[in-house]
Image (spheres, helix red, strand yellow):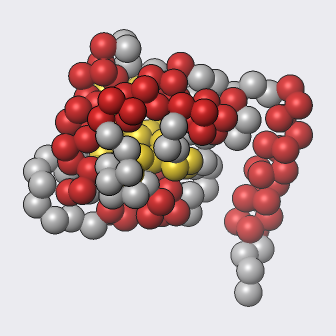
């Protein structure tokens, strides 16, 4: 699987700590930056990751790291076809994939240490959508997205 990763300046160090793990797990890794701790805006990088996931939804997932994980999830979820989940432990990571078919993980470097983040990433990348009883709910999520693309709120 291809894993596209990025961070803002707040997530830069945590991103560096995760790069080796992702490669060790056998995934193709694409790093969209940032490549230094100099201040940048998380929406710019969340959009890069989300667009990469949208363009190749069958073989690409994304990981975005900012200070809390929330802002990047909000930004990424604006991109049709992207289902970003801010995860803070292995349970939310597994649940986001198995129940919600998340295709983009966001992490908060100020709330998640590197060892926990590694465990979250390992769990998230090894989990997949369960379908079954979750399929009907997931189909409703897709229906909401299609409806708003046709006729956005006015």
Relative horizontal placement of residue 121, taking residue 11 as reference (left or right):
right
Name which quarter of the figure residue 9 lies in: bottom left
Up-down relation of residue 152 to residue 12 (above or below): below
Relative horizontal placement of residue 41, taking residue 86 as reference (left or right):
left
> What percent of the width, then of the height, locates residue 54?
52, 45
Up-down relation of residue 45 to residue 20 (above or below): below
> What percent of the width, then of the height, locates residue 5?
33, 40
Relative horizontal placement of residue 114, taking residue 108 as reference (left or right):
left
Up-down relation of residue 33 to residue 23 (above or below): below
Answer whether residue 95 is visible to the viewer in this image.
yes
Name which quarter of the figure residue 52 lies in: top left
Q: Residue at x 83, y 35 (%)?
A: 134
Up-down relation of residue 38 to residue 98 (above or below): below
Q: Nearer the viewer, residue 59 or 7?
A: 7
Answer whether residue 55 is visible to the viewer in this image.
no
Q: How many marks?
A: 0
> What percent of the width, then of the height, locates residue 154?
73, 87
Q: Residue at x 44, y 64 (%)?
A: 71
Q: Residue at x 52, y 63 (%)?
A: 74
Q: Residue at x 30, y 21 (%)?
A: 21
> What percent of the width, then of the height, locates residue 62?
44, 39
């Amino acid at each position: 699987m291809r894993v596209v990763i990025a961070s803002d300046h707040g997530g830069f160090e945590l991103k560096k700590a995760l790069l080796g793990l992702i490669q060790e797990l056998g995934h193709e890794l694409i790093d969209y930056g940032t490549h230094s701790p100099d201040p940048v805006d998380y929406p710019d990088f969340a959009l890069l990751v989300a667009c990469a996931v949208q363009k190749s939804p069958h073989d690409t997932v994304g990981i975005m790291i900012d200070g809390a994980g929330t802002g990047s999830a909000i930004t990424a979820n604006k991109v049709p076809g992207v289902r970003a989940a801010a995860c803070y432990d292995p349970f939310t990571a597994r649940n986001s994939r198995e129940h919600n078919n998340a295709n983009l993980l966001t992490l908060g470097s100020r709330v998640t240490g590197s060892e926990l983040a590694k465990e979250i990433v390992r769990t998230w990348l090894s989990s997949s959508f369960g379908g079954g009883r979750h399929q009907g709910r997931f189909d409703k999520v897709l229906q909401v997205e299609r409806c708003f693309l046709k006729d956005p709120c006015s």
